[in-house]
Amino acid sequence: MQKPFAITLDPGSSLANKTGTWRTQRPVYTSHLPPCNAQCPAGEDIQGWLFHAESGHYEAAWRHLTRDNPFPATMGRVCYHSCEGACNRGKLDAAVGINSVERFLGDEALKHGWKFTIPASESGKKVLVVGAGPSGMSAAYHLRRLGHHVTVMEAGPLMGGMMRFGIPQYRLPRDVLDAEMQRIVALGVEVRLNTKVTDIRQTMADGSFDAAFLAVGAHIAKRAFIPAKDGARLLDAVSVLRSMEGEEKPMLGRRVVVYGGGNTAIDVARTARRLGATEAIIVYRRTREKMPAHDFEVEEALEEGVMVKWLSTIKQADAGALTIEKMTLDEKGNAVPTGEFETLEADSLVLALGQDVDLGLLDGVPGLERQDGVVQVDPRTLMTGYPGLFAGGDMVPSERNVTVAVGHGKKAARAIDAWLRGEALATKAKAALASFERINPWYYSDAPHTVRPQLNLARRTSSFDEVQGGLSAENALFEARRCLSCGNCFECDNCYGVCPDNAVTKLGPGKGFEFKYDYCKGCGVCVAECPCGAIDMVPEDV
């Protein structure tokens, strides 16, 4: 029988027709770095723990998150969530509420009593951590999980550092902070409170420590020269916030002026309102656009009745009054004086002009380089010029916030572990960034961002109750499911369903897919239809 021209194979023999030989390019599954992960100063695998959360596996999500950050309930309240600013979903409708889901997971852990796993083996090495703030306790956590014996020495009476003494209770309830600190102690970390280290080398020698991580916070208030007459009441912001942890609250009076433009200035002004001040006024020498405080904090302060005098500076403090000079911006945007003055009534003036670190414990240590009030370190390992001595947080050149400090603790712990083992610190090349252009947004339905509840305004200004509420389980699940899984396969089966050659094989749940290149013609339909941009087309070797 003569076969028609188009028929070359017997029926049922299509597997023998390896159409992949026609291909000039082929698809490959790729893993890209999500922009949220790339932005996180604590180095969290945000997309990884959101994957568990969107399935309702909250404990798995919490354990995945705490591989990098031991403080999800705390960070869910105080982190400025720059990850959300980088989120690709923000270009579609609104960024995923990463911070709100993190807080939910942290609160779930506290509610259900989830604990960290005790290390299976001991290294026999002893590491000293100086400072029980976010950086020090983060380092202690990671070092302990690596099997090292960790001793934390803290000059203050309580753990938490600037999280406790620099962040008001209406932002961070102390029971939340204490619970997350104690969970680290339960791993076997030794904490010595009211123990100030004045000579780091002597302390290391006395305790036979093999390495040390310095994480002393910036507790010393910067001063400004303001002529003050007798009777003028001047305080510093750090002392005011620190005294809020004691039995006796600071007496600020009815009219309180705060000088500065950072988040600490905002916190003090909002604290003054809660202490009964009828007027809390921030004096700042530039405009709102130039203010270093985060915009959402400024907005909350304004809602609570805090007033701001923009383009103003304080020239003199008298008893019950301040002399204010008006400023203007020059052509370069710098604030310059105008020579115009006014009087502002005030019972007290609080200076919030920044903080410095006490580096006295480093006196006499050879090889250290200090510059601009901080210690110079190797940016990759955070080791100082003295072998075995590492530093992080406020003590080193970096942005000063809790998330950065937590990231320093993890980074230093890994470097210390490698140093103790006599090994070079392993570095892993970062994958290419998963840009928005890789995403196929038409696959994602509109899903509005979940707004966290807030305490009503009357209670905000009359108590220190927490202002920002948390998500319910239902809302947290919805918010987690808004994640686009940028640049990484989440097994949606699109490639499997659209391939005209049946050249995609499913490997099973959690294992992804693979291409059967003998049959893939390189048409690129799978790439075009991948929602999250997890497939690339590459030239074929011919």
Image (cartoon, helix red, strand yellow):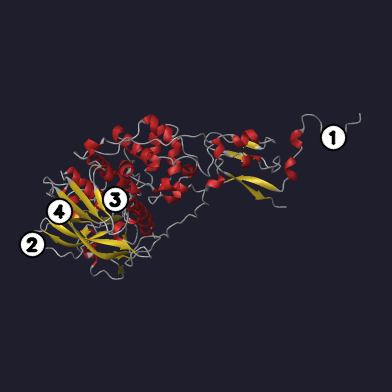
The answer to whether 60 appears left or right of 249 in the picture is right
According to the picture, the residue beneath numbered tag 3 turns out to be: 134
Badge 3 crowding class, 10 Å Cα cut-off, few under 14, some 14 to 19, many 20 or more, is: many
Residue farthest to the front? 340
Amino acid marked by disc 2: Asp
Badge 4 crowding class, 10 Å Cα cut-off, few under 14, some 14 to 19, many 20 or more, is: many
The answer to whether 187 appears left or right of 421 in the picture is left
Mark 3 lies on a secondary structure that is helix
Give residue 23's position: percent from left, percent from top. 72, 46
Amino acid marked by disc 4: Ala
Residue depicted at 38% across the width and 45% down the height: 67
Image quadrant of residue 375?
bottom left
Of mark 1 and mark 3, the one earlier in the sequence is: 1
Q: Are marks 1 and 3 in contact (CB under 8 Å)?
A: no
Badge 2 crowding class, 10 Å Cα cut-off, few under 14, some 14 to 19, many 20 or more, is: few
According to the picture, the residue beneath numbered tag 1 turns out to be: 6
Spatial separation of the CA atoms under disc 4 and disc 3 = 35 Å
According to the picture, the residue beneath numbered tag 2 turns out to be: 230
Of mark 4 and mark 3, the one earlier in the sequence is: 3
Of residues 403 and 463, the one drawn nearer to the viewer in this rendering: 463
Of badges 4 and 3, the one in the foreground is 4
